Structures are given as C-alpha cells and as structure tokens.
Image: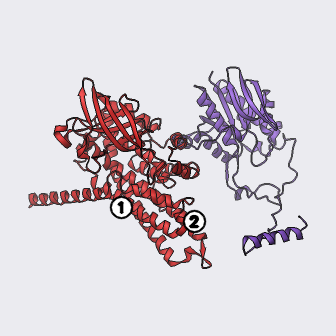
Chain colours: A red, B purple
Amino acid sequence: MMNYGLTEDQLTIVRLAAEIAEKKIKPVRAEYDEKEEFPWPVIEDIRKADLFGVYLPEKFGGFGGGNFELVLVTEALSRACAGIALAVAASGLCAIPILLFGNPEQRQKFLPELASGKKLGAFTITEPEAGSDATSTRATARLDGDHYVVNGVKNFCSSGKAADLYVLFASTNPSKGPRGISAFVVEKGTPGFSFGKKETKMGIRASWTYELVFNNCRVPKENLIYKEGHGLRVAQGTFDYSRPGVAAQALGLAQGALDESMAYIRVRKQFGKPISSFQAIQHMAADCATQIEAGRALLYSVARAMDAASKPAVDEAIKMGLPVYDVLEKLSGGKRWTKESAMVKLFCSDMAMKVTTDCVQMCGGIGYMRDFPVEKYMRDAKITQIYEGTNQIQRNEIAAMMIKEAASSERREAVNA
Amino acid sequence: MPLNIVVCVKLTPSTANIEIDPATGSLRREKMSFAINPFDEYAVEEGVRLKERIPGSWVGALSLGAPDSEAALRESIARGVDEAFLISGPAFEGSDTFATGYALAMGIKKIAQIKGRVDLVICAKQTNDSDTGQVGPAVAAWLGWPGISFVKKVEEVSDKFLRLHRMMEDGYDVIEADLPAVIAVLKEINEPRLASLKGKMAAKKAAIPRWGAAELGVDESKIGRRGSPCAVAQQAAPPARPQGHRIQGGSPQEKAKQLVEKLQELKLI
C-alpha cells in the first residue's frame, strides 16, 4: 500500500486491526458465512482490542480519533470479512447520531458502552413502505406523559437482535409528513419491542438482519434525539458521516479479493505457465489495483477533511455542553458533507463490485466455488451498492448538491457584480 | 483478596532458522529476529486473567537479558500487564538456569519491596530457545516457595492457597499450594489475547526500570558465567535435511506404483 502519511497511532490501529483480521477472522469467516451465525467470539476479540471506539472522544472512553480512524479499522477488518466488520460499522451508525445530535446526558449515558464494545448498536430507519423514500415512515411515537409510545414495524436492521441499543425513526406528528419524523434511542428489552423475521441474505451473512416490531413500546422521553420533527435531519447528518464507513467496507473487501486472487494467479498454471504471465489476466489485475488505489485516495482525503472540520466542533460542543450539530453549523457555516460522503460511498462500492467480479473471473472455475474465498467477496460487495442509500440515491444527492452549489455561486456573483 | 502477580518473560529468537557461529559456538544474534518467547504469551495471559478475575490485583512482568529484552516487556504491557522491570548488565552475561533463577528471585524480592508483597509468580513451562524448563522451578527454589510446573488450569484462588490442575501423562493432578507460590504454565491453560490498542499505547509510554547487579544487591559470585555451574561446551546446528525424492508425472495410479517400487528398492516394505 502507498504511504498515505498515517500517524504512528493510526499505523498502530491499522496493524492491530489487520492482525485481528488475519488471526481471528480469516480462519472462521467461511463458517460464519455458511451458518449465518453472529460471530460473538470475534466481536469479543475486537472488543478486547479496543477497536470499537477508535473514532469516539476520549471523554467517552474512545481513543479520540475521528471518522478516518473508523475508516481504517473498517477497511482492515473488511479485508478479511465485510460481514463481520459490519458489527463495528453498525455500532458506529448508532453512535454517530448520538455523538452529533445527542445532548450531554445522552452522550454520557450511551457512548461509553458503545466505545468499549460492551454494547453493540444498530440503526433502524427502513420500513416495508419506506426504503429509499424515508419520508414515508409509518412507525409512530405518541407522547404520553414521560414516555413516547412507539408502534410500527422496521425491517432490514443490520445487527438486529445482536445489538443492545437502537437508533429508531418514528413519526411524532404524522400530519406533518417528513417534518413529523423524530429520532430516538431504544434499548433492547424495552417492553413492547420485539424481533420479527430474520432475513436470509446473499452476502454479509455473518451479520444478522432482523425485522423489529414495536407494539405500544414505551420509550423514555429523554431518549428523543435532538428535537421532535428533526428526525430526517438526524438521519441525513448521520449518513454524511457514516457513508465513508460503507466505502471503507467496500474498499477493504475489494483489496481482500485482489490479495487472494494475486496469490492464486501466480501459482495456477495453464498452457504450461502461471496464468499471471498472460496479458489478459495482467490487465484485469492492473485495473483492479488502480481502481482500488483511486478509491482509497478519495476515501482517505474525504475522511481527513471531514475530521479536520468536525473534530474541533466535537471538542467545542463537549466543552459547551451543546449538541455537536449546533456547534458544527456555527463553525463551518452550515457546510454539509452530503456530496463528498455520497461520492466516496458511490465510487468505492461500484469499484468493489467491479473488482470482485473481475477477481472471480481471473480465478476462473475455482473463483466461483464456495471453498475458495473470492466468490464471497463478490456476494458481500453487492450490499455496499445498496445500503445507506442505493447508489442511485447517492447520485441524486451529489447532483442536488452540485445544482445548489452552482446556484449559490451564481447568486454570489450577482451580488458582487 | 487482591493478588500481586509477577510474570517472568524472555526475549527469544522468533525464527526457526537459528544460526550458530562455528567459531564461538554461540548464536549469531545480529542475524536473527527476536520476540517474546511464545510460551510466555500463555503466562502473561494467565496473569492478566487472574488480575481480571480478582478485583484490585496487580500484574507485573520481569525479564533478565540484554537491553533489547525491553521488547518482550513492552509486549507484555500491550497485552495487559501493569508494570515491567528489566534485570540487565554485563555481570549477568552467561548465566545458566541456576544463576538466572537466582537473579529473577532477587528481582521478585525487589518488586515485593516496591509493591508491598508478591503473592504469585507465573513462568512459562520453557523457552523456545534453550528448552530446559528449569527456570520456573529454580525461581521457586531460590525464593523457598512452593513450585508447581505443567499447570494447565488455575481452578481456584483464595486468600491463602491456589488450587491447580497439573498435567500428567495419564490425566492430571489437583494440587493445592500455599501462597506465595511459583507456577509454570502450559499452552493448554488459555488462549492468549492479542494486544489491545490502549495496551499498545501504554507499552509505548511505559518507563521500564533497569536493574544492574548493584541495584539488585545480588551476590556476584552467584550470577553470570562465574556463578553458573553449567557451561555450554558446544552448540551446533542440526545437519541440513537431505533432499527428498519427488515422484513426478502421470496419473495417481502411476505415481502410487512408482512410490511402491521406490519403497521396495529401499527395502522399506
């Protein structure tokens, strides 16, 4: 890998995650994929290595890194198995909205448990009728005294049932449509909260995907994240920060698939020569490596730029006892990362699909077989083009931001003229 | 009752290709890479597990060796040990297991002075370089404490004693030993964890005191070459393995036929 100028601490994180990937994940990944079981012993290894909290402030038991550190861990673990790495990423998807939008009490209550990995987190927005269109959320949360009474069904929840904390989206005011949606933290074991169907999937099979059922579930009022009616803002703000994690998963698995393929094509002989000596194979391998490096360069620069902007806001917000989002709005003049985070997610996941498909092709018949690890990378790659917004939605968001930026620069020019 | 535990560790060659200088008969250290003795990983893990099991406990690591032995101590800290101490100096060079046991015992006494007391010493059953398995028992003898080797399980730890499983050829013994005690543990005892991120950071920052003969107050006639009743007369690398015979080509049936012919030719069947 190229020298990206990682700090000594970042290199330590990468080496540690790579060691876990090599020693603890690789030997068991095929078994968890086959059995579709949750990899509890591996989760315990990741927890003991302190890798759940690399991106969270030290005040909450984290390592004090940022988005970039989360990207590095996710990439290194996904190089062995993106399904197992998803447990870390899904916990991040629960911690990020609490970090960015939570009040000081919520941060203090929930983040240390997620940082230590003692509790796993999950994020649940999708409903049977609300996939790409999160505005049609039907789950409701009605205020009743000190509690919100939640009713409805959520589905496709990653780390469902395995997680202890869930960031949930439900409407507190259905008459207001999208502006009636609010975000909550719900703890597993809250009466009225149960698990429905367990999905069987194409890839990332070491991760549980569950339907969640809320039946008059009473969620304490203090578990409302940010303000009533601001749920979609919480979701979008979270995705701005979490999509680089999906990109990191895609990047890691693409690299893992290419590593396996490179080892194989150098020993596989046909026509009396290793197949790596054929130009047809060489060009495919060269394209894979080039695309991976392009993805990495884009992802690392975006994650670093996001950290440079957001980490001072996090520190300031902790000091002032305010939600990070409010400080961020003030410090960066409302600068959003929607475009850039959509770009890295789009680029890296499309890249991973192409690279893993080509890796199967380079390995030929054996590449298609389940006792060789490359086909699993291809199955795992597909989800990265779909979750946290399909790549079509990413393109919509990139274009929408481009149009907005063009319009506002025209306005500025008009004012200056 | 919280325990103060000391784990003894050693930096040893991490490669199987050990080179011996034919002139001096000693290891060519400059050509080799070193790491914590792989058996010590189990001793460190057991120490850290006991610390986690008994709240308020403390675990330290102690090594005798060249200054680069610090690497083994830092690795121990990365895996959860609280503090580390190094015994090092020219006076200790050439120590055999008798002298090493004495030096380590003196180090443990010094740690006991600093920490108030030491309740338990954990060694690995052996190192991967000299393979004697004698240092653990020697430390126990020098301290005058009970010494139990081949420990595969620490079943119970109370205020006063340990209940251990000692592996035997035909099963295991259940042994109760008074504290303080020295145990030497087997690979079967646990599965060592990897280092943690916080551990690695602590290892990087840790200040490791280095004790020479004077700081330790040792009797210099009992350490180093002078204090070692055993001397290595000669060391030699095992002869290189002769090249094998490779059965080439053809179908599995033909290969099998060739193999049988070869074995018959050698009068092995």
Label 1, label 2: how far apart the Cα atoms are: 26 Å
Q: Which residue is mark 2?
A: A263
Q: Tell whether A388 sits left or right of A230.
A: right
The tally of labels here is 2
Secondary element at tag 2:
helix
Q: Residues within 10 Å of mark 2 (few under 14, many from 20)?
A: few
Residue at image position (51%, 70%) is A362
Q: Which residue is mark 1?
A: A347
Residue B210, percent across and down? 66, 39
Marked residue chain, label 2: A
Task: Give the residue drawn at x 42%, y 46%.
Answer: A199
Q: Position of residue A181 (x, y in %)?
A: 23, 39
* Disc 1: CA contacts within 10 A as few (<14), some (14-19) or many (>=20): many
Q: Is residue A208 above or below residue A275?
A: above
Front position in the image: B84 or A232: A232
Quarter of the image for residue B193 reads: top right
Question: Disc 2 marks which amino acid?
Answer: Ala
Image coordinates for residue A305, horizontal then vertical, percent:
34, 53
| Residue A307 seen in the figure | no
Estimate the x, y position of residue A370 in percent, counting from the top left: 54, 59
On residue A183, the disc is none
| A124 horizontally vs B248: left or right | left
